[in-house]
Amino acid sequence: METPVRIVLHGARGRMGRAILNVVDQHPGLQVTARVDQGDDLARALQQGDVLVDFSVPEATERMLSLCVDRRVPVVLGTTGHEEQVRRRIREAAGVIPIVWASNFSTGVNVLFWLTERAAQILGPDYDAEIVEMHHRHKQDAPSGTARTLAEILVSVRHALWERDVRFGRQGLVGPRRPGEIGVHALRGGDVVGDHTVIFAAPGERVELTHRASSRETFAHGALRAARWVRDRPPGLYDMRDVLGLRAPA
Ligand code: NAD
């Protein structure tokens, strides 16, 4: 029988941390052996685990990563909202340990990523692309990491430039839409777990691809699936499409 995967849960008292604790018993062979939150001793907790699962705050990522690199502990990284400097640090750390870094661990959203890539390839640049996301009133970062991933997919398919073509919101006398623009818009309110829509609009028609999450447990199941997957991987940067086998476009 496979040896159980021992998980160090970073951000254990948060909404996602609690969702993981609620569902981990449904994953045979996985156990949370250490719960870490602000003020706890992460270095010590890492002695009790094979994989670290992180849903905390972006400010905690650099320290968390250097401890995991020192101890060669693979990481499932769910926290979003990192500055470019921290994003660089994540890529560097993946040269030493395997990291599954995903803005969204739900299976459905990863299918949305795949569909967005295919739709953008098929429809081409004449269809105006806009991304709209909505989250609960407590969310700290905007736009969501998932909306950012959707924008990265569109930038890559269209050979666009992030700085020039991705446009976050519109206000004032902005004039007509520039060809090639990729609009990204963040709505906040209530207890919305996470909605994302990608719109492709042309004269005469539009295609809308929507995913709505109604429970954080969907992210928790995906993150635990990633924890099992990452334990025996070689160092490298992976995302949920690798875990689900959705990486290669058809
Ligand atoms: P939350 O605010 O409910 O929880 C964050 C937790 O981190 C809190 O318990 C807080 O005390 C803890 N924390 C703060 N500083 C810390 C530190 N230095 N060390 C350890 N823990 C610390 O937030 P949440 O809704 O659980 O979301 C957490 C993160 O996960 C956010 O960045 C969110 O955007 C992201 N998220 C990602 C996905 C995904 O699928 N990738 C899904 C949902 C949320």
Image: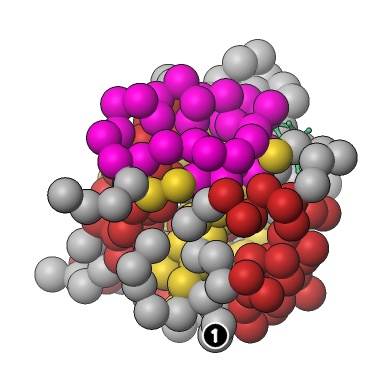
Whether residue 165 can be seen here: no
Q: Is residue 145 shown above or below 84?
A: above
Residue at position x 29%, y 52% in the image: 3
Is residue 191 located in the magenta-colored stretch of the structure? no
Q: Position of residue 226 (x, y in %)?
A: 37, 52
Q: Which residue is mark 1?
A: 95
Residue at position x 33%, y 47% in the image: 4
Whether residue 189 can be seen here: yes
Q: Is residue 11 shown above or below 183?
A: above
Residue 57 left/right relative to 103: right
Residue at position x 72%, y 52% in the image: 44
Going by the picture, which residue comes out furthest to the top? Answer: 190
Is residue 17 located in the magenta-colored stretch of the structure? yes
Q: Position of residue 111 (x, y in %)?
A: 27, 49
Quadrant of the drawing holding the C terminus: bottom left
Q: Residues within 10 Å of mark 1 (few under 14, many from 20)?
A: some
Which image quadrant shows ligand 1? top right
Residue 247 left/right relative to 187: left
Q: Position of residue 186 (x, y in %)?
A: 65, 39
Residue 15 sits in quarter: top right
Residue 71 left/right relative to 114: right
Q: Position of residue 135 (x, y in %)?
A: 61, 29
Residue at position x 53%, y 52% in the image: 49
Q: Which residues are magenta?
A: 7-35
Q: Which amino acid is tagged 1? A: Gly
Q: Is residue 188 shown above or below 93?
A: above
Q: Is residue 229 shown above or below 104?
A: below
Q: Which is more toward the observer, 148 or 107?
A: 107
